[in-house]
Image (spheres, helix red, strand yellow):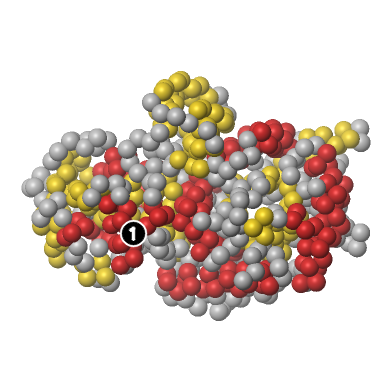
Amino acid sequence: MTTILLAGLALLAEPAPLLVGGHAHGADNIAALAELGLGNFVWIPKVGYSMGNTPWDAGHDVLADVDACVRAGLHFMVSQRRGLGEAVRPGGFEFGGDCSGDLHAPATIAEIRRRAGGLFAGLHAEELDADLVQSAIRPSFRSRLPELYAYTDRAGGRAAFEAELTRQRDAAHAAGAAYLPNLCVTHHACGFRTGADMVVAELLEHLPTTELQLAYLRGGARQFGRPWGAWVSPWYWGQVPCDDKATWPVPQAQPGGGHTAAELRRALCLAWVSGARLLTVQETEPLLSRVDGRWRLGPWGTVLKAFCDTVREHPGPLQPLVPLALVVDADNGWAPAHLWEDWNETESVWGKLSTDRSDAMLTGFLQALLPGFGRTREAVTARRDGYPGAFCATPLGPFDIVASDCAGHALRGYQAVALAGEVRWTPSLRTALADYVQGGGRVLLNALHLRDGERLVQDEALLGVRLKASIRAAERIRLAVPVPGLQSEYREPWFAFVEVERTTAEVLAADPDGRTILTRQRLGAGEVWLSTPEYLLAGYGDLRAPLRFGQELLGALAPAGMVTMSPAADLSWIAARQGAELVVAVANGAAEPRRATLTVAGQSEPLELPGGATVLLRRPAR
C-alpha cells in the first residue's frame, strides 16, 4: 500500500508541521506573502479563480505558482476541484451548488510533485457538503446529479455522499497526491471516515457557527485519528475586506466589506487551540496593500502576521481538553438552516430529506451548548448574524461531536457522553458505551434510544430498569435526590414519557405522581443516566420545544474539568495541553467588555476582555 505524504511527512509518523498562511495566485503575490512573514504555507486556487490582480495564462499558471512557492520554501496545497460529481456545473443562486470538476491532469500533478517534493501538501476539493445541500434545495437542481440524489433514507444519504468522497480520494491517491476535502457544514465525519488525509473546514462566510464546526472536527479527529485544518473566509454578503482598491480592482474587494479582522483572529485562535494542523485564509485582497510601490499588510494581514508569530514560537501539537461529547448517529446528516445569505430556509438531512422530532432533540442540546447557533431569517437579512451566528458563546464549556460508529477508545478522555437525536442502537455502540462507563465515564441516554426499529430494547444490566410499552404525560418534574446543576422542580409544557419499572437503578427525578423521569445506574466506575421524556421535548404545541430540564441535564452531566470559565456569558473558550503548558483561547463575542473568572487546576484569576477581543493565555500544566 502506498503511503500518502502530507507536507513531506508520513501521516503515520511524527505529526506533520503546523501549516499557516494565505491564499494566492501569481508569483508576485506569493513572494509578498513570504516577504511579509505570513506563514509557511500557500493555498493555490483553482485554475481560473479570480484573484484580483493576476490573470490565468501561460505565464501565470499553476506550475508558475508552484515554482514561486518552492523558491520561497513555502508548503502549499492546490485546489483541484469544487463540488460533487464529474460534470462542470455553474453556480449561483439560480443554479444551486456548482462543480468545477477535476482541473489538473495526472501529468500536471506528477510535475507538481517532481518540482515541489515534500512542500506539496496535496489536492484540495472545495465545499463538498455545501454543494450537497445547495444542489438539493430544489428538484430541478437535484436532477443534474440523479445518481447522487437517488437515496430515500438517511443511510442511503450517507452511502451516496461517502461514495463520492471515496471516488475523489481514489483519484487523488492514484495521482500520488494527498486528498484534502473541504467539508464546511456538518458532515465532517464523512471525510474522516472515508480516509481523507486531512479534512479542511471553512469558517465564517455564511456557514454554520464556528464553534459547532470545531465540535465536529475535534470529535471526528479523535474518533478516526486523522488531522484536520481550516480556511477562514472573509466573504460576507458578496464582499471581502480590502483597503487598497488600486492593487485589487475587483468589485468584491471593498473597504469595510466582508468579515472583520477581529473575527479572523477569533476563528484562528479557536481553531488552533482546538487542534488544527493547517490554518489558511481565503483571498489575497484582505491581506496585502501597496504603498509607494511596496507591499504592506492590510487589516487581515496584520492579524495573520501576529498569529503566525505566536504559533511559530509554539509549534507543537495541542491536545484539546473537552469534558463532554455528543454522540450522533453515523447516518444523521442534519444541517442547520439560514446559511449562504438564507439560501436554505429550513434545516435538512443529507440535503433533501426532512427533519423530525429526533433532530429537534439534537438542536435543543446545541441551543444549550451554543445559544443562538441557529441563525434566524431576521438576523441574516438584517446582517447581524456575526454574533450569535458566525460565533456563539459556550456557557457550558467546549464539547465535541462523535458518530455512533465510534470505538470505545474514541470516548476515553471525555468525562461525560450524551446521545443526541435518533441513534440506532447497535451491539457495537452498546459495547463502546458499556466499556466507557465501566472505565469511569458517565452516559446520558433517552428511553427512545433503546429501540430496534419501532420495538423497545430491554437492557436491564446497562440501565437498571425495564422499559414498558406504555406512555404517560406530565407537566412537572421533581428531583427525588439533589443533583448538582439541577433545580429541585421544573414546570414544563405538557410532555410524554416512556414508563419504566425500576430494578437496580436509582431514581433521580420523577413526576408529581412518582413516575420515573430520570434514573442513574452505577456500573463499574461509572454511571448511566436514563431520561424517559420523548427526546426531552414538549409533547404538543411547539413540537420542537426542548424541555428546560433536558437542556440543564447537560450541565449537570459533565463535572467541571481542569479549566473552567465563570460566568461565561458572551464568551467562547477552549483549552488545550501543549507540552508542559496549558493554552486557553477566550473570545468575547459581545461588543461590550466582559468580566469572568478563569480557573485552572483550582487556581482562579479574574479576566476582563474588551468587546470583540480574543486572547491566548498560557499557564503551567499542573
Q: Return the x and y of residue 349 as percentages of the image width and height.
A: 45, 64
Q: Is residue 505 left or right of residue 535?
A: left
Query: Would residue 377 be seen by someone viewing this image from the given angle?
Result: no
Residue 183 lies in what quarter of the image?
A: bottom right
Q: Nearer the viewer, residue 47 or 149?
A: 47
Q: Return the x and y of residue 490 as percentages of the image width and height.
A: 20, 40
Q: Return the x and y of residue 289 as percentages of the image width and height.
A: 82, 37
Q: Nearer the viewer, residue 385 or 40?
A: 40
Task: Indicate the quadrant containing the N terminus: top left, top right, bottom left or bottom right.
Answer: bottom right
Residue 120 lies in what quarter of the image?
A: bottom right
Q: Nearer the viewer, residue 577 or 465?
A: 577
Helix, strand or loop at mark 1: helix
Sort mark 1 into few (<14), some (14-19) or many (20+) by Cα contacts within 10 Å. some
Is 47 rendered above or below residue 284?
below
Please give the count of numbered marks on the rendered protein.
1
Q: Return the x and y of residue 104 as percentages of the image width and height.
A: 77, 68
Is 214 rendered above or below residue 83?
above
**Residue drawn at (46%, 20%), measured in percent from left and top?**
606
**Residue drawn at (55%, 45%), measured in percent from left and top?**
275
Q: Is residue 565 left or right of residue 259?
A: left
Q: Which residue is mark 1?
A: 432
**Residue drawn at (75%, 40%), measured in percent from left and top?**
38
**Residue drawn at (33%, 62%), measured in percent from left and top?**
429
Query: Would residue 353 be seen by someone viewing this image from the given angle?
Result: yes
User: Which residue type carries mark 1?
Assistant: Ala
Task: Indicate the quadrant containing the C terminus: top left, top right, bottom left or bottom right.
Answer: top left
> Quick one: which residue is furthest to the front in this view?
13
Q: Nearer the viewer, residue 16 or 592?
A: 16
